[in-house]
Each structure stands twice: as structure tokens, then as C-alpha cells.
Amino acid sequence: MNQFKFYSFFKNIDKNLMSLVVFLLFIGLITLASASQQNISLIGNQILNILIGMALLISLSHTNPKQFLFFAPYLYIVSLILLLLVAFFGFESHGAKRWISILFFNLQPSEIIKITVPLMLAWLYHRFQNNINFKTHAIAFVLLAIPCAMILKQPDLGTSILIWVTGCTIVFLAGLSKRSMLIFGFSFALSLPFLWSMLHLYQKNRILSLIDPGRDPLGTGYHSIQSMIAIGSGGFLGKGWSFGGQTQLNFLPETSTDFIFSVYGEEFGFLGIVGIFIIYFFIIYRCFDMAKKMQNTFSRLIAASLVCTLFFAIFVNIAMVSGVIPIVGAPLPFISYGGTSMVVSLAMIGIIMSLHSHKSLIAN
């Protein structure tokens, strides 16, 4: 009887996907130990974050997806309220106000938005699935623009762009016509000067430094230059765990969070980077494969959008530290240190597993 209960507890867990995620978490902890120079407190906090995220993943995998559909609007509203609370009661760190302190936990509502916005947009298109038109798409863009503008104000350009791109992906998958694409694309192009004027000076300088990192090597170009030096100095096999000069001598900034991939690249080299790319590839591939098997509008859009969110988050972080795109401040899923980002990433996997294991139930 106990064996049956134990089996049923994990019956909705996709074994292959879970194995890949756990292996990536293990790599993340090893890299964090070196990046933090064996900071026991930081490592302990990350283990706690992982345990909380795993508990939520398993819980969500057993949740009836109809609950996601029912609570989507309420979760969206709550997440907007949390963003407002950040504006009034949040605390500032590194020049940005993105967190609110709740008991022993520092909550970052912009990370929660990565789940609530896809849920809300999927709910919208599911609600009007028999009458999706230009008006529906316009409402979707409004629902998307509100949290993006609030997050941009914090300021958090990276997360805002990530959520915007993910939201646009949902709108596209929902059947945006070519005419509507042209209208929205033209409107976005016209708004670029206005969007540029909204950016902070340091954000503008980071974008300009992408073209020429040497224009301000000790200022806006410093992070990018040090990151590329770290990754390049890893060579083919890397310098070895905890032997990265850029990391251990504190040339590389934010080693535990945004630039942890640079630490990994320096210590494990090209071979290690290829290995982690392969793991990420199979995680994304498996999630997309599960999304293709969904049997209704809501579940397909949710699964596809969450996979896209993970993919864009991975791409933005790695491209950022490699000097391909400007430095925008974005954690690497399953590896970077962070409570909310870790829990949210694992929650996404749990939701995808739930949608996959209950796909027949939703269809009926």
C-alpha cells in the first residue's frame, strides 16, 4: 500500500525531464560554490530555494489544469498588486527596486509575472477561442503592456523584454493575422524613439557599449569585457573548479547571479559549455514535445509560452554574458542564485508536467 502511494506521488512527473533538471541543478550548485568562494550561507540558501521549488513542482504536477484556467485572472491581478507594492514598499539593491521582503523571503514579483502573464493571455484566448479577432489581440497587448511598463519602471529592462517577447509569442501562436502583425509591428517601430527616451542613461550606455565595449572599459563596458575575458580564458577544457582567475580575484561582477555562466565557462571551458548546451537543448526539446501533445487552446498556449519563457531566459543570459546583446540583468534558469527565479523556473516545469499528464481531462 505504501509503495502504491509513493508511486502515485510521482506518477505525473516526467522522469526524463526531471532527471535533466536535477542534473542541471547539481551543476548549478557546484558552480555557485566556486562563484561564491565557498560561501556556506549562500549555498545553504540556494539548496533551500531548490527544495521549495521542487515541492512546488511536484504539487503543481498533481494540480488539475482546470484550476489554472479558473485562477488565471486572479493570479494576474495579484501579481500586478505585488508590482505596485514593490513601487511603494520595495527595497532597493544595485540601483533597482525589484524586491519586497515577506518574512524571511525576498520576493521578486517580476519573476512571478513570467507565469501569470502567459496564464492570463492563454485564459483570454481560451475564453474567446471561437471569436478571436483584432480586438482580442489588442486586449492581449494591453494586458501584456501593463506589467511590462511597471517592471521597466523598477528598472528591470531584461525581465521586461523577456516578458514582452514571450507575450508576443503567445499572441502569434493564437493566430495573429499578417495584417495585424504589420499594424502592431509598425506601431512598435513608431514607438521606438519614445521607448529609447524612457530608458535610463546607464541602459542607453550599455546598448551603445555593445557596439564598442572599449568606449567605456571601466564603466558601462566593464561587465561585458570581464565576462568575455572569463569565458575566453577557459579554453577547451577550462581552468578547473575554483581555479578561475577572473572569478577568484573578483574581476568578474555578480558571479553568483547574472554572470554565473561566465564562471562556469572559465572553469569548465568549451567542453563544459557544450555539455550544458546539450542539457538545455533536451530540456527545451522535451518540453516542446509535451506541448505539441496538448489537446486544447489553453493548455497548448500555456505550455508553449512557458517553454518559450525558459528558452528566451536561457538565450538572453548566455548572449548577454557573451557580448552578443547588451547587459540587461537576467538570471540563468536552474543555475543562477535567487529564490524567486529558482522557484518560478521549477514551477514552470511543474505546470508543463501537469498539462501533459492531464491533457485528456482538459480536452473533455
Image: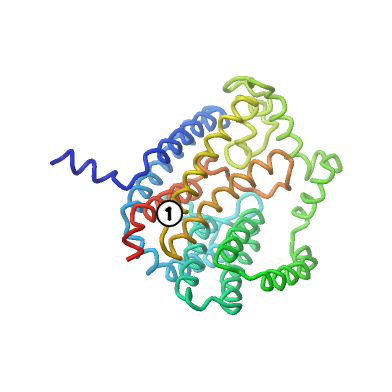
The picture places residue 10, in percent across and down from the top left corner, at: 29, 43
In depth, the one of 12 and 343 nearer the eye is: 12
- For image coordinates 51% across by 59% down, the residue present is 109
- For image coordinates 71% across by 46% down, the residue present is 327
The picture places residue 184, in percent across and down from the top left corner, at: 69, 71
The picture places residue 140, in percent across and down from the top left corner, at: 57, 72
In the image, 123: left or right of 328? left
Quadrant in the rendering for residue 13: top left
Structure colour scheme:
rainbow
In depth, the one of 84 and 276 nearer the eye is: 276
Q: Which residue reaches farthest left?
A: 1
* Vertical placement of residue 130 versus 144, above or below: below
Q: Which residue reaches farthest right?
A: 215
The amino acid marked with disc number 1 is Lys
Q: How many marks?
A: 1
- For image coordinates 42% across by 70% down, the residue present is 74
- For image coordinates 83% across by 46% down, the residue present is 211
Local secondary structure at mark 1: loop
The residue labelled by disc 1 is 293
Quadrant in the rendering for residue 261: top right
The picture places residue 306, in percent across and down from the top left corner, at: 50, 54
Q: Residues within 10 Å of mark 1 (few under 14, many from 20)?
A: some
The quarter of the image holding the C terminus is: bottom left
The quarter of the image holding the N terminus is: top left
* Vertical placement of residue 275 versus 71, above or below: above
In depth, the one of 14 and 230 nearer the eye is: 14
